[in-house]
Image (cartoon, rainbow, N blue to C red):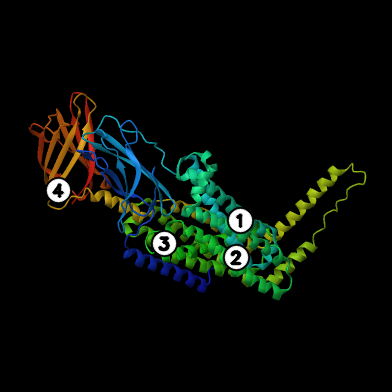
Amino acid sequence: MTATAPPLRTPARRSLTRLLLVTVALLGALLAGAVPASAHAALTGSDPKDGAVVATAPAQVALTFSEGVALDANSIRVLDPTGKRSDTAELVNLCSGDIVKYGVRLRTGIPNGTYTVAWQAISADSHPVSGAFTFSIGAPSATAAVVPSQEVGGGLVGVLYGIARYAAYAGFVLLTGGAAFVLACWRRGATVGPVQRVVVGGWLTMTAATLAMLLLRTPYTGSGKLSDAFDLNGLRAVLETKPGAALISRLLLLGAAALFVSVLFGAYAKREDEAEKKDLTFGLAIGGTVVAAGLAATWALAEHASTGLQPGIAMPVDVLHLLAVATWLGGLTTLLVVLFRAPGIERAAVLRFSRIAFWSVAVLAATGVYQSWRQVGTWSALVDTAYGQLLLVKVALVAVLVATASVSRRWTAHLSEHTAPEAEAASIVEQRAGEPEPEPVTVPDDGKDTKRAAQLARQRAAMSTAREKRIRDADPERTGLRRTVLAEAGVAVVLLAVTTVLTQTEPARTQQAVDRAKAGSQVAVADRPVDIRLPFDTGGQNGKGTVELTLDPGRTGANDLHVYVQDPAGKPKDAPEVKVAFTLAAKSVGPLPVVPDHVTTGHWSASGVQIPMAGDWQISVTVRTSEIDETTVDKNVKIG
């Protein structure tokens, strides 16, 4: 017979509707009036700027970051065209107020040419960040230093560290959620083997993952070589950092968690006196909550919540968020294991978990909205950045989980209306009594028939397993609940994966802050010309020089265009051909070609150049210095 889920009762529908309405209202209210925060360090500026050509060598190179970073003498390197270091390896702290700025001094007497600035830092939220840019002294040189293409935190070490990060979250969910399910919903579960394996497996997974992250931290934030995982000096340096202290604290708390688990599945499981067991339940609940909150705090103290806007509020909110996730998803996993592996569970226990899961989702929604506001900041960031798009995927997954959970609530309510726990137990006993006992296994005294004895033992175990499966599957409502809980668990695994990816993704409002900073150095002021200067090198004889472009008045509509070409000495230089193109990639406009007229030596112009709409335009200038030598240089400017 096919089981059909009963209709959702009115109170459950009302509760679900209220939760969704409140979540949507909070999301709209918070994001509508949000202001940018800062987290996950990114380079927002440099002096000299990327691609700049300066007349004389600067005294130092300075970098500006979006948040606090950890640097050392080798974090900023200035390399000449041959790859030789041109700085003094002396880190200069140029921070002032909210401005995070560091630099390195350059050696005296360095020659003209193109210099590469390679930098690497540890963000205040524990993520390694790196990058490189170039600037030129006098004029660009034919060659520039080559820096490793692999970003810090990538490669095999990055993959292993990412796996350990996933495993740590998963272990925390199983450990915390499984223990909470036993204490709050189903005390008898402390004696059930599958439940014990869920909780112990969570502890083992989290412990192994934490140890792996601690060892991999040195190569993850440094060389990228797996062999450096066992560098004792590197490990000592890691322990002095905030992420290292958080990992060590997590290991200490896992020691306390091991004691908690041993009591839960030892003295607590064996206790038969209800009064004593009730007192022990209260003590374990308090102790377990403290340990679980401490474990959650090791993430909050070392990652996104610890930096940026309102860290004093964000860190406890992050702890609540992680506890809600663990209680819901860990409890859901434990319930799924019980439904598939345990002979039976009381309906009252399922109902209790249903209520706890509902309030966990409510806490998850409220804290998630606040966290989203901190990390996104604006509506545009929600749709225009990778972080915002991942967040939308996470919200969609939560919506699917809530919908699936509502179906599970129907099955749970239906079960409680039709079958009482006592009737279920009596039914199980009756079914077991009606089945023949398997043939007892007897090992002959002469020891010659051990193969037959082993075969009989396997048959007996198979019969016992089949009997328990028939008992579990005899209840159609239980079968329906198993299916919906299995669907919930599948979505939850994807949700956990997306959440972990989010912790490693550049937060949306930081990405926008970087984009604004880059655009800020190129913004065209209304009614003032766009004026850019770009070095070029066509690769042929006398192929080096500088091109200057002016767009007047530098706004949408008709503009006058002037292009000036100069040789390395700054004198006007003629070229067989000069072309300009305008592209607005965000709107898929262009390239719009412009062929200016030659006016005089080194000067080309065009009038009536139409800029159809405002935006971040890419201006590309193509210079040909011979029949075969040609190059295109470009720069983004904001017009309108």
Residues at marks 1 and 4 touching, judged by CB atoms closer than 8 Å: no
Residues at marks 4 and 3 touching, judged by CB atoms closer than 8 Å: no
- In the rendered image, residue 332, in percent from the top left (x then y), is placed at 57, 61
Mark pair 1, 4: CA separation = 62 Å
| Front residue (pair 70, 329) | 70
Q: Earlier in the sequence, mark 4 or mark 2?
A: 2
- The residue where tag 3 is placed is 371
- The residue where tag 1 is placed is 203
Tell which tag, 2 or 1, sits nearer the viewer: 1
- In the rendered image, residue 431, in percent from the top left (x then y), is placed at 76, 63
Mark pair 1, 3: CA separation = 27 Å
The amino acid type of the residue labelled 2 equals Ala
Helix, strand or loop at label 1? It is helix
Q: Residues within 10 Å of mark 3 (few under 14, many from 20)?
A: some
Residues at marks 4 and 2 touching, judged by CB atoms closer than 8 Å: no
- The residue where tag 2 is placed is 180
Q: Earlier in the sequence, mark 2 or mark 3?
A: 2
The numbered disc on residue 554 is 4
Looking at the picture, does residue 99 appear above or below residue 530? Answer: below
Helix, strand or loop at label 4? It is loop
The answer to whether residue 463 is left or right of residue 3 is right
Regarding residue 327, the answer to whether it shows in the image is no
